Image (cartoon, rainbow, N blue to C red):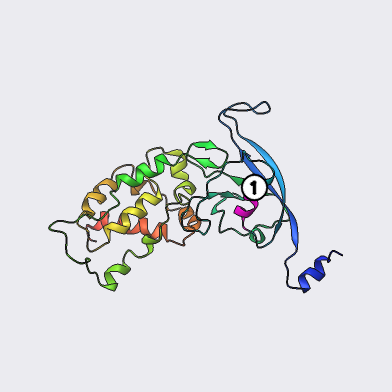
Amino acid sequence: MTATAEETTAMGEIPSMTVTLRIERFNPEGSAEHPAGEAYWEEFQVEAHATDRVLDALHKIKWDQDGTLAFRRSCAHGVCGSDAMRINAKNRLACKTLLKDLNPSRPITIEPIKGLPVVKDLIVDMDPFFASYREIMPFLITSGPTPERERLQSPEDRARFDDTTKCIMCAACTSSCPVFWTDGQYFGPQAIVGAHRFIFDSRDEGEWNRLEILSDTAGVWKCRTTFNCTDACPRGIEVTKAIADVKRVLTTGKI
C-alpha cells in the first residue's frame, strides 16, 4: 500500500510534487519546428522534492525527457560558478537554488544570463567576460627576486581585500548589470572586483597600472550604482562597494 502525503511526512520522508519548468530554448541550427537563431519557450514537468535544487530538476529533464537540453554545470556545490542562469528573472546558481524558495506551485522560468551571446539553450559564450578579466592583469605583480618563503601579510592588510577574493567568476554580477547589457565596451562588475582584489593587496606593485586601465571610459565610471551586481552575487560579495573603493582611489589618489 502506498502511504499518503500526510503519512509520508509523519514518517520523516519528504513527499514529492510536480514542478513545471518553463525554459528558454535556443538552437543556432534550428529545427523543423523552430527557425535557426530564434529563441522559444518550452515547458517541462518533473517530479521533485521541495528541497531539490533547480539543477536537480534540469538533470531530470535532460536525462529522462530531452537529452538535447544544454546547460553548464560542474562541481554542483556553488564553487565553480559554471551554472549561473536567470531563474524567475534573477541571476542565480542552479546548484544553490532550492525549488521551495521559488514558489514551485507556479511555473519556474529559466533563461540564459543576459549580455553575452547565447551558444545553445542556457549556455552563453563566456569569451567576452574572460577577456575583460584578463585585461585588468589578475595576478600578483612584484619586483625583485622571488622569496624563499611566502610573502607575509598582516591580518589588517588582508582584510582590505578579503571580500573580493570570494569571487568564483560565475558572471552573475556582470550579466545583471544594465550598463553591460547595452554597452559592449564596459568591463563589467566582475573585472573591477578582480582588479580590486590586487589593487588593495599590500604585496602587489601593479596597482596603478590597473587603476589606469579602470579609469578609461570602459572602466569604473560607467557604473551607475544600481546594486544589481551586489544583489546577484551568490557569494555575498559587496560588489558595488568594491567598485566605490576603486572610484575613491582614482578620485583621491590614495589607496
Query: Which residue appears at 42% of the width and 61% of the height?
Result: 238
Residue 20 point in image, percent of width and height: 71, 49
Where 251 sits versus 3, above or below? above
Residue matched to label 1: 109
Q: Is residue 175 magenta?
A: no
- Chain part drawn in magenta: 53-62
Name the element at disc 1: strand
Position of 6 with respect to 116 (left or right) is right
Mark 1 Cα-neighbour bin, 10 Å: few <14, some 14–19, many ≥20: some
Task: Tell me which corner region of the image, top left, top right, bottom left or bottom right, holds residue 253.
Answer: bottom left
Position of 14 with respect to 124 (left or right) is right
Residue 189 point in image, percent of width and height: 40, 50
Q: Is residue 59 magenta?
A: yes
Residue 229 point in image, percent of width and height: 46, 53
SS majority, magenta = helix
The residue sitting at the front extreme is 1
Query: Which residue appears at 84% of the width and 64% of the height?
Result: 2
Task: Tell me which corner region of the image, top left, top right, bottom left or bottom right, holds residue 69.
Answer: top right
